[in-house]
Image (spheres, helix red, strand yellow):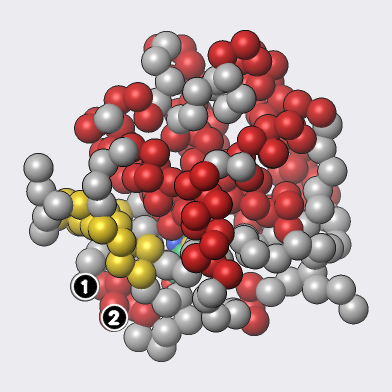
Amino acid sequence: MSALTLVIGNKNYSSWSLRGWLVASHSGLAFNEQQLALQAADFKQQVARFSPAGRVPVLLVGETAIWDSLAIAEYLAELEPGLWPTSLLDRARARAISAEMHAGFQALRQQMPMNVRAVGRTVPSTPALEADIARIVDIWESCRREHLRQGPWLFGRWSIADAMYAPVAARFRTYGVSLPVLAAEYLVTALSDPALLDWAVAAQEEPTLPSSEVGLPN
Ligand SMILES: N[C@@H](CCC(=O)N[C@@H](CS)C(=O)NCC(=O)O)C(=O)O
């Protein structure tokens, strides 16, 4: 098979890169990593070398670029089908909540930017943000209720759906979002993923991007 290289952004701030990277890590496939700095003046030129879409993550399969976190996840799942749940209906549901994350939750994304290493931040509540959080809690609680006996992840065993919500888990920690029991338990599981912990260690060393630093104490 051609060599795999995942092009990513800053580990502290790039939530879509984190999703692609978690799927690649959980696939067990060997891959190289190439990092681009989102704050670099020539970021657009750099990323254009890999992808016409101009965004990270990008998976290079030999010379061929696959861009967009969900397309990357689907490609890796073609190679390693265990990245999605085994049961047909669970697989469909996992895809539904992954697509919902990929396409939505704009208020959460804008008002609570991912900042892996930050804790103790507070942002003003808005109806749109509250609605996004309530919907995510509903997703997490219903998945966990259904799969309690199969393991601690959304569908029991780890799947791409967990990668899609990992940046949300990081945000809930950063901004101290309070959660009901099953969602709180899932948050602990998500934040204890050894792959996420490795990513978070690397994020500690990176430069600060002032535009993504929100909710600092006064
Ligand atoms: N739908 C894309 C979104 C990718 C995306 O927005 N990536 C951000 C980093 S997290 C980016 O490249 N931003 C740089 C830019 O837009 O110039 C995906 O799922 O991969």
Task: Judge: label 2 CB < 8 Å from ligand 1.
Answer: no
Judge whether 142 appears above or below 214 on screen.
above
Q: CA distance from mark 1 to mark 2?
A: 7 Å
Judge whether 198 appears above or below 217 on screen.
above
User: For the image shown, how many numbered marks are present on the structure?
Assistant: 2
Q: Are marks 1 and 2 in contact (CB under 8 Å)?
A: yes
Tell me if I can see residue 138 in this picture: no
Left or right of residue 128: residue 21: left
The residue located at (42%, 11%) in the rendering is: 87
**Quadrant (top left, top right, bottom left, bottom right) of the N terminus:** top left
Q: Residue 173, labelled with which disc?
A: none
The type of residue carrying mark 1 is: Arg
Judge whether 129 appears above or below 39 on screen.
above
Q: Position of residue 137 (x, y in %)?
A: 73, 34
Q: Position of residue 128 (x, y in %)?
A: 76, 50
Left or right of residue 73: residue 94: right
Left or right of residue 106: residue 180: right
Q: Residues within 10 Å of mark 1 (few under 14, many from 20)?
A: few
Quadrant of residue 209 in the image? Answer: bottom right
The type of residue carrying mark 2 is: Gln
**Quadrant (top left, top right, bottom left, bottom right) of the C terminus:** bottom right
Q: Position of residue 147 (x, y in %)?
A: 61, 15
Secondary structure found at label 1: loop
Q: Residues within 10 Å of mark 2 (few under 14, many from 20)?
A: few
Specify the quarter for ligand 1.
bottom left
Tell me if I can see residue 160 in this picture: yes
Which residue has dot 2 on it?
45
